Amino acid sequence: MIDPEARTARAGATTTGPVTLINSFEVTPGRDEAFHALWERTSRYFTRQPGFRSLRLHRAVSDDAPYRWVNVARWDTEAHFRAAHATEEFRTVVTAPGWEEFPSTPVLLEEVTVVG
Amino acid sequence: MIDPEARTARAGATTTGPVTLINSFEVTPGRDEAFHALWERTSRYFTRQPGFRSLRLHRAVSDDAPYRWVNVARWDTEAHFRAAHATEEFRTVVTAPGWEEFPSTPVLLEEVTVVG
């Protein structure tokens, strides 16, 4: 069974500005297509939630990277992010069959320094 | 002793387009200022290397996040990224006293999907 809590970044003190989710996935080389198809279906839920700004999904250039896929998603506020992770539909999409193969490490962050 | 190899993302097959480094740091709550000062000094080396595009340094909203600071840096090509990690000055900056306190997990990736 997949625990939706383990699929959600930890809550912080309440922040008010934009936040960034960086979610790192463990994917065995050779399973990229299966992961990507599952991720695309899941991401359709998030991209239509209020406060969603953007995402960039990346794949590692190396097969032996500790995390082979990483999603960087920006949200208007932490409250928007939390609301999107508190619905029944969220529980359904993140516990969809297949996700148990791809452990993830989600972290919610704020930007501190930007260069370029 | 700090091993500069452990501070460098693994090489991939040769890629030709832009690449993104996502480097996740373990920082004890309460040590944010020490980490940030050390990171600022180190980042001055990278931001003046050929092929450097941009970086965004983030801090986790939660004290118990598995990685409390994450840097997302974009480079023109993997070759530029590798060249910046093959100099004597690189070895000097990443083995500077203080870094042993902050283990990092660097991963080099390519963008696959962009939304928004």
Image (tube, coloured by chain):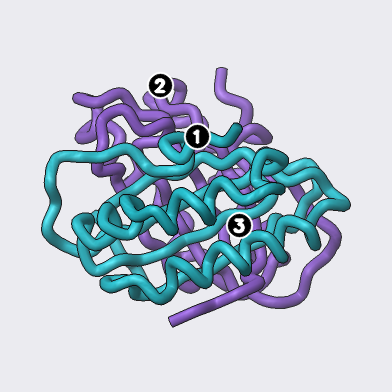
Chain colours: A cyan, B purple
Q: CA distance from mark 3 to mark 2?
A: 23 Å
Residue type at mark 2: give it. Glu
- Secondary structure of the residue carrying tag 1 is loop
x and y percentages locating residue B26 in the rendered image? 42, 30
Residue type at mark 3: give it. Ala
Q: Residue at x 19, y 57 (%)?
A: A79
Q: Nearer the viewer, residue A83 or B29?
A: A83
Q: Nearer the viewer, residue B68 or A74?
A: A74
Residue B93: in sight, yes or no?
Answer: no
> What chain does badge 3 belong to?
B
Q: Residue at x 43, y 58 (%)?
A: A89
Find disc 1 in the rendering and name its residue: A3
Find disc 3 in the rendering and name its residue: B84
Q: Residue at x 46, y 35 (%)?
A: A6
Residue A42: in sight, yes or no?
Answer: yes
Find disc 2 in the rendering and name its residue: B101
> What chain does badge 2 belong to?
B
x and y percentages locating residue B37 in the rendered image? 26, 40
| Left or right: B16, with B52 as reference point | right
Residue type at mark 1: give it. Asp
